[in-house]
Amino acid sequence: MKALSSLAVTVLGMLPLACGGGGGEGPGEWEAPAFSKSVVTSVSGPDEARKPYLVALDDGFGLAYSVGSVGHLARLDGSGTIQWDEDVFDDDSCSIRDLEVAGSGLALVWTCLSPSRGLYFASYDLSGGLTASSTVTDQTNLGTQNPHDAAIAWNGSGYAVAWSSQDLEDAPNPNTTYIFFALLDSDGQIIGDASIFDTSYESAGQPSLVWTGSGYAMAWTAGPTDPNIYFALVGSDGSISSGPTGIATAGSFATSASLAKATEGFGVAYMDDQGNDVNNFDIYFLRIGSDGSPQGSAAKMSTAGDTGDPSLVYSGTRFGLVWSWYRSQGLASLPAIYFGEADDSGKKLGDAMIFENDDAAPHPSLAWTGSKYAFVWHGSQNLSDNLTQILLAQY
């Protein structure tokens, strides 16, 4: 276990709210939660703290993030104070891809390039003890060439993993990036073999995966020319039972899906340029039925354009999401973080800027605790001092 003396948590106070940019409750009726922020950890020097993933536990949070070449898994208490922080890997070619609550523990997946090329899995108990680990791609001949963009879902006794990769040996086209899918037991060992999820596209990636209670649901980005968001239902045996169905506007450039399971059906948030400008994305939200069919039209959640990195959760009655907004100022791009909600039918309720300028950076990750939203992101409080931080917001 790592020493925590340098990882002080500093509460930075409350920021004023901006009321939403339209929605089902009418002007002034919807209001974002009063988020406050705290610093989970600060890193000074050339190694940046980056791309955190957050999940809610009964009495706090699980957090995965990277600092330089080192991947970390940490447990936070309810205030955001680190209880333990374990090194998962030390390899600057590796990137954490997803984090999942797995029964009474945590599980994560990461991918590495050469010389450690592969898709990796590890699980930990809530005291920080390693309970299982494996190299998923050492157990199959599929999806081994360049694994990236992985996702994991816990089914109560094991896992499903999805990842994108080229495959020079067994795929129909060795120059194409496919989605690969495998079932794992609780020790991270493949059950049966991996499969190529779909071969209809020139390129596919960015899977988002959830357990439905009887199988899995997955959303991902795929070509051919104008990338669309596709959705499919998958049986507990790994076979596709519904889809794939393209859910974004035909002719648009859609990418970066974030999928959430609802009481009935699903919600998916994604970036889409609506065929207008590939450099000017907005965030859209779409309700999907239990049978995998889109329900109505997608709601435009953002109001400012130049957005990215959506992260979606379901609260039991509403969908909450956070995303980044990139504003150009001279030669710099100053991001802000937005929060928005949609009701259970998929109608937008509102959106609001939460943090901006030095307080914000890409890749926010949102969680629902059972009573409130919380999210993490990496920020740069002082670029001249090379200071980067992992920050937590809750209310």
Image (cartoon, grey):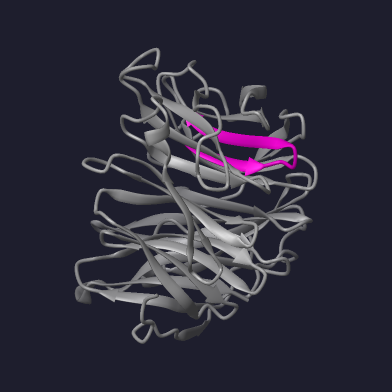
- Considering only vertical position in the picture, is 320 above or below 79? above
- Confirm whether residue 309 shows in the render: yes
Give the magenta-colored segment's residue range.
Answer: 206-221
Name the quadrant of the C terminus: bottom right
Measured as percent of width and height from the top left, residue 241 is found at 69, 23
Q: Nearer the viewer, residue 39 or 24?
A: 39
- At x 40%, y 85%, the residue is 8
- At x 52%, y 24%, the residue is 197
- Considering only vertical position in the picture, is 178 above or below 298? above
Q: Nearer the viewer, residue 94 or 23?
A: 94
187 vs 141, left or right, is: right
Magenta segment main secondary structure: strand
Name the quadrant of the N terminus: bottom left
Measured as percent of width and height from the top left, residue 271 is found at 50, 41
- At x 49%, y 78%, the residue is 83
Q: Nearer the viewer, residue 332 or 156?
A: 156
- At x 28%, y 39%, the residue is 117
